[in-house]
Image (tube, helix red, strand yellow):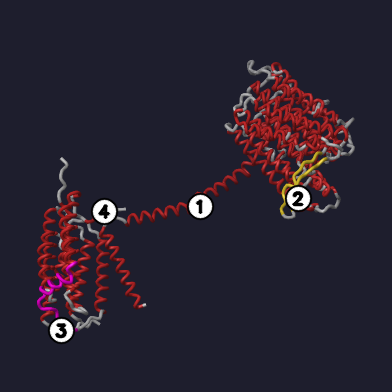
Amino acid sequence: MSTSFAEYAWLVPVFPLAAFAILTAMGKGARKTGPWIGIIGTLASLVLSLCIAFERMTDNADDYSKSIEWLQVGSLKLSAGFEVTNLTSLMLVVVTLVSFLVNVYSQGYMRDDDRISTFFAYVALFTSSMLGLVLSDNLLTFYIFWELVGVCSFLLVGFWYHKPEAKAAAKKAFIVTRIGDLGLLIALLLLFWYMPDHALDFTTIHNVFSTPGGVISVGITTLIALLIFVGAVGKSGQFPLHTWLPDAMEGPTPISALIHAATMVAAGVFLVARTFPIFEASDAAMTTVAVIGAFTAIFAASIGLAQNDIKRILAYSTVSQLGYMMLALGVGSVSAAMFHLFTHAFFKALLFLGAGSVIHGAHTQDIREMGGLGKTMKITAWTFGIGALALSGIPPFAGFWSKDAILAAALDKNGILFAVGAIAAFFTALYMARLYFLVFAGKPKQDGHAHESPSVMTVPLIVLAILSVVAGFVDTPFKGWLGEWLTGEAPEHHGSGIVMVVSVAVGLLGIYIGWLVYVKGTVRRDAVSSRAPALVRTLERKYYIDELYDLLIVKPLRSFGKALQAFDDYIVDGVVRLAGYSTSALGRLNSRLQSGQVQTYALTALIGIVILALAIAGRRFW
Amino acid sequence: MTMLASYLTLAAVLFCVGLYGVLTKRNAIVVLLCIELMLNAVNLNLIAFSKYGVTPSLTGQIFSLFTMTVAAAEAAVGMAVLIVWYRNRATVNVDEFDELRG
Amino acid sequence: MFNFNIDFSGEFFAFFSLAICAIVGAVLAINFTKVVHIVMSLAFTFVALAGLYILLNAEFVAFVQVLLYVGAVTILMIFGIMMTKHDGEGQEPARPLLETLAAIGCICLFGILFFAIRNADFPTEVAPLPDDNTRAIGLELFSRYAVPFELISVLLTVAFIGAVALAKREEDPQ
């Protein structure tokens, strides 16, 4: 094979990195040019990624990987390199595409912000780190980029650091994901310890764990798999580490779209997919992943029913959809998970950007204060509707096909998992219907403030809407090639008919109920809350998870910290103060001895002489 | 006990009494006088040794003359200092001479 | 232990009475409160000491003692007393700690001195001093001790000039 685009894949993360470097060097002065630098950087990456992807589609090329020796410690070698497979090329396209569109959109959304060039610098750094993460050929560099995207997320969530909620959310995001990162780090160390030749690259991992009766025992495998999953749980906002993701919506909306909906949170799913052989080698780990995924899907969807902040609803929706992906992984269908990741990235980015447009126009985030926006914000309303339908799983939109694939895989494995997934799909349709009808239908609750966003913001919406419609067709049950392309095996679709019917039925049912309640008014809105107020309050308070963590973890840790502080204040500082105080007390004593009373001095001299004489005389009797 | 020992003991008694006066009296004039008393005790020692010492000679007496001269000079200067002090502070109490207090 | 071994000669009685006089004068001086009384009782001590000097064959020194101490220093002190006020006498605040410590220190010092004197080994034979004490001292002063003598005269001059300069009332600038 002659020169291929894959050989230049390492350039993909380099473009945004260069953009970041230039933006940082230019400082705050680059208000006009700054956004363009970011856009051009991601555009270059996008073009290259598309080239790589198309190249791989056409001639079905072999995986390309190249690594250089990075560190040598004794006999130990650490390498750094990149690897292009079908999976990574897909992820490259998703990341660069969403990133590019978000960059374009942000140019309009962030226009009035003072630190717009800083914002674009952060976004460029994030894009670069995410692409590096995707391209990494071994777990060590993967982990480094993993942490880098975490840092960027922290910076961007806390971008409006003058808002106390944003600061708190940034800290929360960083600390909660850190728990997951610790799991991943331990998994990394365990792998390093147990792997032959301490190899950490994905190819070797794949080979080692795919061999039956491999070198690593089942117990250790399960442990490693579960620890990796802990990392994924932290990053992808799975239960019980999901609490940071809704709070992360304090960041600018484009960031919610880019990081907390489309790309970074998918890194956890991607991690599991990348290390899938380890999971496959352990049934317990697979079951855990499936159960956690299914539980998160229905858990977050039920919370989404009772929220009133438009971005929070979408955030819980994201958590729920990530749960779906985990469920797909847990039941052994990487292709379904990646398919859903792929489609979800588009329609969730669309929904978030649409929400940003709504917020931009309506100047509020509370859906109860909105209404009738469909008349004034036509493009936003249409594109948002497409995104909502895609998310609800209505054919022919993208979400239907991918969700269908997941549900089919779940049914193949376990009926209960399928049922949970279906109920979650119903909830999804219901809360999306509630959101859509409350925001866009009905009478305007504000007088004429709402206006359509500028075209720099609506064009990305339209592009994403088109993608949300067509992206599903890459892998339909009738003619699927994505799964085959990704895994190299011909996918089997079981019970597609039933699944499709159920999936469409619950989706339509959810939308219908939403329509009855929020448009037609046949069912009163407080029908549930008046009968079961405790349930609604529990949902509104997100099952009191935050309060529980506060009680169980934050409070004890804080008191422990207080105790340590007291120790520091009174014991450690006390010793220091004692040293200082005793010195000054000695000084004060000496100063008091210097009374200026000549007679006292003379008396002291006399006593000294007497003592000396007695000592000399006493020596005789010794 | 020889006469020399008796003289020395007497000188020790006078010296200690003078020392006690120097240490306890507040009036600077009395302190000066007590210093004179101590000097006299020393003189008594010198003169006693000039007669009863290992090598009796007049040197002791001559030294005591020098001592007296120096003592007289000291008394004169001390009194002058006291008077200047009294002019400035209207007191001659030693315990109020604490300008060097730390 | 205390074998005083005293021969009760005339010299001893003279010494004894003069020593009593000196000690009494000193102790009274410590106990008096009025400054004039103190000066007078110390003058008494000085006179007693002059008597002791005569007993020790130091007639010239005794003469100078009377002249200098009883005559000059005491009179100087009385002038000093007259030029300063002494209102607060007798009602001074006691300093018991200082006085107790001073007493203990002095008694200890005396004990040490007494112990040293008792244990010292003194020669017993007494070489005769020249009869003409004054003449002998004069010869010594102007021959062997000529330089110290001149130096002491310079010292005296400086001291007296200094005393005058110190005590002189400073001129008003106006």
SS class of the residue under badge 1? helix
Mark 1 surroundings: few (<14), some (14-19) or many (≥20) residues within 10 A: few
SS class of the residue under badge 3? loop
Question: In the rendered view, would you say A155 is above or below C130?
Answer: above
The residue type indicated by label 1 comes to Val
Circle 3/circle 2 CB separation < 8 Å: no
Determine which of the numbered discs, if any, sits on residue A114 in the image: none
Task: Compare residues A395 and A215 and report the one nearer the observer.
Answer: A215
Task: Compare residues B82 and A341 and report the one nearer the observer.
Answer: B82
Real-space CA distance between mark 3 and mark 2, rounded to the nearest whole angstrom? 112 Å
Q: Which residue is mark 3?
A: C7
In the picture, residue B8 is in which quadrant? bottom left
Is C145 part of what is drawn in magenta?
A: yes
Question: In the rendered view, would you say A581 is above or below C60?
Answer: above
Q: Position of residue A441 (x, y in %)?
A: 71, 19
In the displayed structure image, the side of residue A253 where residue A347 appears, left or right: right
Real-space CA distance between mark 1 and mark 2, rounded to the nearest whole angstrom? 41 Å
Circle 1/circle 3 CB separation < 8 Å: no
Q: Which residue is mark 1?
A: A572
In the picture, residue A429 is in which quadrant? top right
Q: Which residue is mark 2?
A: A191
Task: Compare residues A517 and C56 and report the one nearer the observer.
Answer: C56
Chain for numbered disc 1: A
Chain for numbered disc 2: A
Across the whole image, how many numbered discs are drawn on residues?
A: 4
The quadrant the C terminus of chain A occupies is bottom left
SS class of the residue under badge 2? helix
Q: Which residue is mark 4?
A: B98
Chain for numbered disc 4: B
